[in-house]
DNA sequence: GTTACAATTTAGCCATGACTAAAAACTACT
DNA sequence: AGTAGTTTTTAGTCATGGCTAAATTGTAAC
């Protein structure tokens, strides 16, 4: 398993190390301050464990750690995180398109596979998919050199009523949520018409394939759309 | 990751546990007495470590351990080993056929993937390949219920000279060896003509696609063939 | 049967990375 | 500035599973 970043890193990284780096990347990308509590809650370990690991990653020059401050990634740490994220998203798309794994299941499968595929396999997957730009949830796939495109669309919750939109991204990996959306016909790139926003942050009325549905505000906030004209 | 055997086993198994069980299975299948030294050499850990692990597997009822005796698998242990072997061989074939990964590289890739694929993914892979019976090296793929077919063919080194054969199995996973065979055109199911055995266990002369090659006796012993007529 | 040699097991060490509980440090309110 | 409350860190425990070195057991030759 030759990793892209192997030349820059002394010791090989465990799945766990990679998960921490990926978590920090994702939290940073969300615009959050990656405090110890935010990080530890996200990865599902105790705050003490997170501190411990962050210190180790810091010794490896993968993160910047200053006590009582938000963690951040070093350039190398970001490279690693983006490589794992690339693996993850390529795998999700591959599993979905090549093996018909439903979009609500690809995440957890990719979560384990992402740590064990070689560069050669990564390349073969990317090639077989025609070097895709986004995964089955609309998340951009980082390039081999560690670049990543902007996240497309804007939240449905902030879209104007009385217009048609196209779903371009779903900001959730939760199986149940995705399965629910799938049942409504709300798959990626589906067109929908936004009827109205109920007041007081209430449900959003949308029409999908001629059928009207009420979406919880919470759900609408996770749906990224662009105007349907495009 | 729901495993077939999860109902029979208390604690989840690590990759390492699975590797030990697989190793014991393979060594047993070779007809070897799985002594501690044989096992430890095969898995690449010290004899002390092997004893340790075997004791733990024994507590989990996966192997039968009697001090100073050969280890053997319990029915559950065999189930686990065969499940991993199924994963391994399905993955090898999948990588080779679906992603064009060369046959000399699929082994090491599958070696890592085999531990992290779910039952659902295993099923999807098997279905997409049409429920295949053998992997790219001709090794039989265990069924989902833990049955495994007999190994096909007999060694080329014991075949009669002056006859045509078909290569049905290669008893090696070594990259260089497989790459070498590939260069000679000796891929699976290729026809070859056995000219002669050089005396004193010397090289074996074979003709492949009209070209004659001398194969080391050691190599010929790894090639399983059947008469070409079939 | 003794003795020598090889194989195996035991004992004890170490690193890893989780955990809990306690200490320390920050923040915010008065 | 002092204090309450929260967050973070430290200290120390535990399980895992490798390792080495030493003790033990088994085997085979005399």
Image (cartoon, coloured by chain):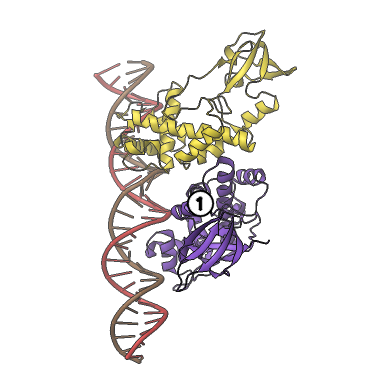
Chain colours: A purple, B yellow, C red, D brown
Q: Quadrant of residue D30?
A: top left
Q: Is residue B3 left or right of residue A206?
A: left
The residue sitting at 55% across, 42% down in the picture is A100
The quadrant of the image that shows the C terminus of chain B is top right
Asked if one can make out residue B177 in the rendered structure from this viewpoint, the answer is yes
Q: Which element is circle 1 on?
A: helix
Q: Quadrant of residue B212?
A: top right
The residue most toward the right is B210
- Above or below, B158 against A199 in this view is above
Asked if one can make out residue A61 in the rendered structure from this viewpoint, the answer is no
The image shows a total of numbered marks equal to: 1
Residue A126: % across, % down:
64, 47
Foreground of the two, A146 or A99: A99
- Above or below, D11 against B216 in this view is below
Residue A53: % across, % down:
44, 61
Residue B227: % across, % down:
61, 11
Foreground of the two, B61 or D21: B61
Of all chains, the one bearing label 1 is A
Q: Which residue is mark 1?
A: A182
The quadrant of the image that shows the N terminus of chain B is top left
């Amino acid at each position: 398993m030759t990793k892209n970043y192997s030349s820059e890193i002394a010791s090989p990284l465990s799945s766990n190390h990679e998960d921490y780096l990926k978590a920090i990347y994702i939290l940073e990308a969300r615009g959050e301050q990656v405090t110890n509590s935010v990080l530890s809650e996200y990865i599902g370990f105790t705050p003490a464990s997170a501190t411990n690991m962050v210190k180790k990653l810091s010794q490896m020059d993968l993160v910047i750690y200053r006590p009582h401050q938000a963690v951040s990634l070093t350039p190398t740490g970001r490279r690693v995180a983006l490589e794992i994220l690339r693996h993850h998203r390529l795998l999700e798309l591959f599993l979905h398109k090549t093996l018909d794994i439903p979009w609500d299941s690809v995440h957890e499968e990719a979560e384990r596979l992402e740590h064990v595929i070689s560069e050669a396999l990564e390349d073969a997957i990317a090639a077989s998919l025609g070097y895709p730009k986004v995964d089955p949830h609309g998340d951009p796939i980082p390039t081999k050199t560690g670049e990543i495109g902007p996240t497309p669309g804007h939240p449905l919750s902030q879209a104007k009523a009385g217009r048609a939109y196209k779903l371009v991204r779903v900001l959730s990996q939760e199986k149940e949520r995705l399965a629910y959306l799938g049942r409504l016909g709300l798959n990626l790139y589906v067109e929908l018409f936004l009827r109205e926003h109920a007041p007081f942050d209430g449900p959003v009325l949308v029409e999908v394939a001629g059928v009207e549905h009420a979406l919880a505000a919470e759900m609408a906030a996770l749906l990224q759309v662009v105007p349907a004209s495009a």
